[in-house]
Amino acid sequence: MTKHNGMAIAIAWPEFTGKQPGSWYDVPMRWLGHNKDFQYKVGHASLILVDGTSGTCSYFDCGRYHAPYQHGRIRDFSTDANLEIHTKANFSNNKITNIRELLSEVQNNKTCFGMGPLYASYCPVNIESARTTIKVLQSKDAIPFGPFVINGINCCRFVRNGILAGAPVLKHRFKLRYLWPFKPMPITNVNFLSDKIIIPENSATDNPEKQDYHSHTPYTKENVKGTLPAPARPENIPLDSQWLGGEVAGGWFWLEPIDEGYLINRYSSVGVPECTGKFRLAGSGFFNPRKPYSFSHLSHCSKVTVIQDDELFEFLRME
């Protein structure tokens, strides 16, 4: 039997409104009133793995962030530095005693893309098994995105699969494996676990700064089949920064040669620094930073992809 050595916290924001996935059912759902302005009120889900010994918390989610059209990617602290959780979990009698403090940090993190009240619950799991499964999925880079896409994923499918990979107890495993398909929504993950808690919407989630991380682009028939267009370049970032969009979020990337590597920065759509680091060029190709190039998918805080003269270059973070 797999040893449980930590907790998996399922998180849901039921009021989150997300862009349609671009599937066959979008049109009939619009006729029925469930798809309004090319968006569904389906909620958003994320997962926290808690180390039962150290109390260290690792945040994971899946979404269409800095990814190609109809694709998503798995995010964590390694790919998106702002997702680091600073609160450490405290335990007593197999319960997380400071769960409200922990979840409040997540609720107040503008880069988690939550909307409205946060719902959460948790259960014991083997965090190594869960983490290994998640990191293997993350290594696939861009993954076909949608609730019913074969070999694809969306946020609540990701959370459900991550918890199951940690081998929870039978009652939780049974519900997630056999009952979840009847209502595959973020809140279902929460309802199927224990110790449910709600963190209400507050001034942090209403903060305009937080809302800057959500797309304000109105969707139309002309732009719904693509990624976010480049917004006006913020005045505080380098002039030669380049925009790389996903369907839900994008960012500005900037590259500069330095001793034995490259300095690469990523900024939010409004110019907030999201990560910076020294990168090395992977492989044996020759990249000339003085010639034109463009940033491409998949690019994040650990790996950046660049195209120059129809050749693809990958830069890996060194520090």
Image: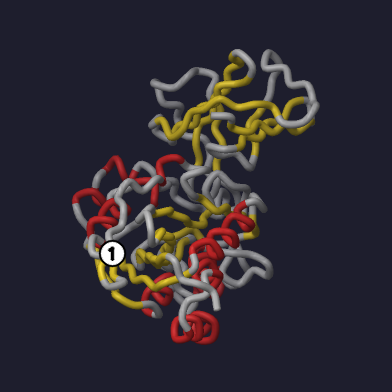
Q: Residue at x 40, y 66 (%)?
A: 7
Q: Residue at x 30, y 63 (%)?
A: 118
Disc 1: which residue = 91
Helix, strand or loop status at disc 1: strand
Name the one closer to the observer, 212 or 3: 3
Name the one closer to the observer, 69 or 261: 261
Image coordinates for residue 238, horizontal then vertical, percent = 48, 19
Query: Which amino acid lies under the numbered mark 1 shown in the image of this protein?
Result: Phe
Image coordinates for residue 313, horizontal then vertical, percent = 72, 31
Q: Quadrant of the N terminus?
A: bottom right
Q: Residue at x 62, y 58 (%)?
A: 137
Q: Is residue 73 above or below residue 236?
A: below
Q: Residue at x 28, y 51 (%)?
A: 105
Name the one closer to the observer, 249 or 262: 262
Q: Is residue 81 above or below residue 135?
A: above
Instruction: Tell me: 83 left or right of 290.
Output: left
- Its colouring scheme is secondary structure
Number of labelled discs?
1
Instruction: Tell me: 264 left or right of 39.
Output: right
Q: Is residue 143 above or below residue 241?
A: below
Image coordinates for residue 194, horizontal then vertical, percent = 34, 77
| Label 1 Cα crowd, 10 Å radius (few <14 / some 14-19 / many 20+) | some
Instruction: Tell me: 138 left or right of 44.
Output: right
Instruction: Tell me: 313 left or right of 1.
Output: right
- The quarter holding residue 305 reads top right
